[in-house]
Image: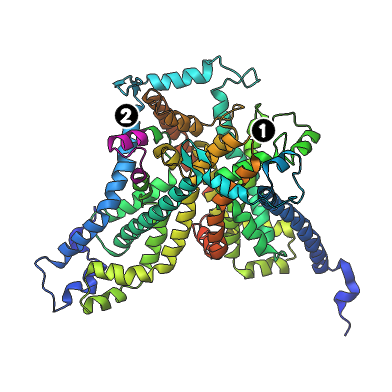
């Protein structure tokens, strides 16, 4: 805890109470504390309820079972055991793949979001941003258009995407058939999941491009000039100048990509509503919540806790490991 | 003396690089153009078809100019009822939730950011650290508990409840406003204090106006986020649907092979219009603010 006696606020330094016209019953520091207390009362109270209470309650729910009337009772680790049992021994399989049951496919779908973000979206975004920075004609127009998916309601964006592939009205339907896709793209796994991934790449590219373009724009011009003098080509410049300089942004985007595993649910929900085995971990939890049935709350809480306990340390570890190659960039 | 570069011609590495760059640049330009068209085309297609009657669209005129411009889709869809609520009432709910939610969120974020940036008090660093921690570390599975909490406080299925959730202020806006207040010199407060202003007066009349730029930028992004938000109104005020929630139900009701798609397109465009106007007016600020999202490099 901070040593209070040694700390003086800027407010005290400013001498609020030096004003000779006003005399207060309280000391300057007390008045500062009163001000801070009043200003932070609601923000902290709201935070304690919506974050503190909710997380503690969720932790408790993970070790409980409930009936449909909301009567909770302790069950130890039963919820966790049920999750593992479902994952490894469930016989429910509508995926069409013998070694995948309906629970394990949820895990694979969710992990896939990290893989496509890190190994497809991110490299594409880096290439896009690099060339946008190269005085590309209409670069600013492209930037404005690429950012559009971030301001369009996700419901409208998902609808615009899915109607393109509609068997009756979709203008891309024939094209998809021509390149070998079978009918009902959103109905059968793994095509259904590939369509969700395709949507995420299509809609998510712009955000990454804006962030990376900003990072590339902050690289000193002298570095590019030096690369030109050294006769470095596109790829040499990209790999030896640009990527090391924007590495912290890349690390952040990798972390965000890994976070998608636990947080992405709206896209599959709006595109398929979970049909075609496109469930993810968080969609499963979202639908359990939307059922408003307490009997499903505890299982959802246990799933969330288990996934956070496994995945959050992995995210932090990855962040730590990939931050090392170029260290902290300072220019 | 003769210019050697002209003699050497294309073998000059600088020129080779130039040709390579030019070719690569135009190839990438083509890719960019295709991607840009893929983003714009669906909405232009919806716009075109929203002016067709249901019959004309169903008859197979999917890409042609409307035989007769049919503007009634926009009026009809506003009066269309989904689960007892008209699209017009959903629009008003969206406006209400967006305006109030943004105002409350930005106000409390500014209060918290100002105190933590400018005053020193116990647990100040802890509060800042927790704010960062909650942004970085994902904790999932808490949605059911959120429902339980809302029921406990009798906030379930009410606009007040959703506004309570939107008033959470230790997020991205807090971080941005924290750095904005940190960069404002305290000498302005000092001068105000000399003139007899107290702490609250200094905050409301000096500091808030000085942080006007970042506050407006945060408010624009926040209002777009709240206008587009699906999950919170869906879960916590199902009896007062916003446009984002209603669109999904409308699409399910009016879509399908026998549905009235031009009306669905009209509703999508109605939902899109306010954010599009905001984006056109403030696109530079929006992109800059996204860029400044705490990313270094």
Identify the residue shown where x is 62% and y is 18%: A99
Q: Where's residue B89, x and y in %?
A: 46, 46
Q: Which colouring convention does the figure follow?
A: rainbow
Q: Position of residue B13 (x, y in %)?
A: 82, 66
Q: Is residue B250 above or below residue A274?
A: below
Look at the image and give the residue range highlighted in magenta: B145-161
Secondary structure character of the magenta stretch overall: helix
Which residue corresponds to mark 2?
Answer: A60
Which label sits in the foreground, 2 or 1?
1
Place residue B121 in its image quadrant: bottom left
- Identify the subunit bearing mark 1: B
In the drawing, does residue A223 fall left or right of residue A49?
right
Q: Which residue is pictured at 28% across the width and 38% down the height?
A: B153
Residue A68, given in percent of the width and then of the height, sits at 36, 21
Residue A133: quarter of image: bottom right
Mark sitting on residue B237: none
Q: In which quadrant will I find the N terminus of chain B?
A: bottom right
Q: Would you name the residue on which mark 1 appears?
A: B258
Query: In the image shown, does A312 or B237 lie closer to the viewer?
Result: B237
Total labels drawn: 2
B81 is within the stretch colored magenta: no
Gap in Å between the C-alphas at discs 2 and 1?
A: 48 Å
Q: From the image, which quarter does the C terminus of chain B lie in?
A: bottom right
């Amino acid at each position: 805890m901070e040593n209070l006696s040694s700390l003086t606020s800027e407010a005290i330094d400013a001498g609020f109470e030096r004003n000779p016209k006003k005399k207060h019953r309280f000391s300057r520091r007390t008045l500062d504390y009163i001000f801070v207390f009043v200003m932070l009362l609601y923000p902290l109270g709201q935070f304690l309820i919506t974050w503190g209470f909710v997380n503690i309650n969720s932790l408790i729910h993970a070790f409980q079972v409930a009936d449909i009337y909301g009567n909770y009772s302790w069950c130890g680790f039963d919820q966790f055991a049920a999750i593992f049992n479902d994952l490894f021994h469930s016989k429910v399989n509508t995926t069409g793949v013998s070694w995948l049951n309906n629970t394990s496919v949820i895990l694979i779908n969710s992990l896939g979001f990290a893989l496509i973000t890190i190994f497809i979206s991110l490299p594409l975004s880096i290439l896009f941003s690099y060339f946008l920075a190269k005085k590309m004609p209409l670069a600013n127009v492209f930037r404005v258009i690429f950012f559009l998916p971030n301001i369009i309601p996700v419901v409208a964006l998902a609808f615009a995407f899915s109607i393109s592939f509609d068997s009756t009205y979709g203008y891309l339907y024939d094209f998809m058939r021509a390149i070998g896709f079978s009918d009902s793209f959103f109905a059968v796994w793994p095509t259904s999941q590939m369509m969700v991934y395709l949507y995420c790449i299509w809609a998510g590219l712009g955000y990454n491009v804006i962030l990376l373009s900003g990072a590339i724009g902050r690289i000193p011009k002298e570095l590019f000039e030096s690369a030109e003098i050294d006769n470095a080509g596109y790829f040499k410049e990209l790999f030896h100048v640009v990527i090391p300089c924007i590495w912290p942004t890349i690390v952040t985007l990798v972390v965000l990509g890994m976070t998608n595993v636990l947080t992405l649910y709206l896209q599959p929900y709006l595109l398929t509503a979970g049909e075609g085995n496109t469930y993810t971990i968080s969609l499963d939890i979202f639908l359990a919540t939307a059922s408003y049935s307490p009997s499903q709350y505890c299982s959802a809480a246990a799933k969330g806790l288990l996934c956070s306990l496994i995945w959050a340390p992995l995210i932090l570890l990855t962040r730590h490991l990939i931050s090392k190659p170029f260290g902290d960039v300072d220019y | 003396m003769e210019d050697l570069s002209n003699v050497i011609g294309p073998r000059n590495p600088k020129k080779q690089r130039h040709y390579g760059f030019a070719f690569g640049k135009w190839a990438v330009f083509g890719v960019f153009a295709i991607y840009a068209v893929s983003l714009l085309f669906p909405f232009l297609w919806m716009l075109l078809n929203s002016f067709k009657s249901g019959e004309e669209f169903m008859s197979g005129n999917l890409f042609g100019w409307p035989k007769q411009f049919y503007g009634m889709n926009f009026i009809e869809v506003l009066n269309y009822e989904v689960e007892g609520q008209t699209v017009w009432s959903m629009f008003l709910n969206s406006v209400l939730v967006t305006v109030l939610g943004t105002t409350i969120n930005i106000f409390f974020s500014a209060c918290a950011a100002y105190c933590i940036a400018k005053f020193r008090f116990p647990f100040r660093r802890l509060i800042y650290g927790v704010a960062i921690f909650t942004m970085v570390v994902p904790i999932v599975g808490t949605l059911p508990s959120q429902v339980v909490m809302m029921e406990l406080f009798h906030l379930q299925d009410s606009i007040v409840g959703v506004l309570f959730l939107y008033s959470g202020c230790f997020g991205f806006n807090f971080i941005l406003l924290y750095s904005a207040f940190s960069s404002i010199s305290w000498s302005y407060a000092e001068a105000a204090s000399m003139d007899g202003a107290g702490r609250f007066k200094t905050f409301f009349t000096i500091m808030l106006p000085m942080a006007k730029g970042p506050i407006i930028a945060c408010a624009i992004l926040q209002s777009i986020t709240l206008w587009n938000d699906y999950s919170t109104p869906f879960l916590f005020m199902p009896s007062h649907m916003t446009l984002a929630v209603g669109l999904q139900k409308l699409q399910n009701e009016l879509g399908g092979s026998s549905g009235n798609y031009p009306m669905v397109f009209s509703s999508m465009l109605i939902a899109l219009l306010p954010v599009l106007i905001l984006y056109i007016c403030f696109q530079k600020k929006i992109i800059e603010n996204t860029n400044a999202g705490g990313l270094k490099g």
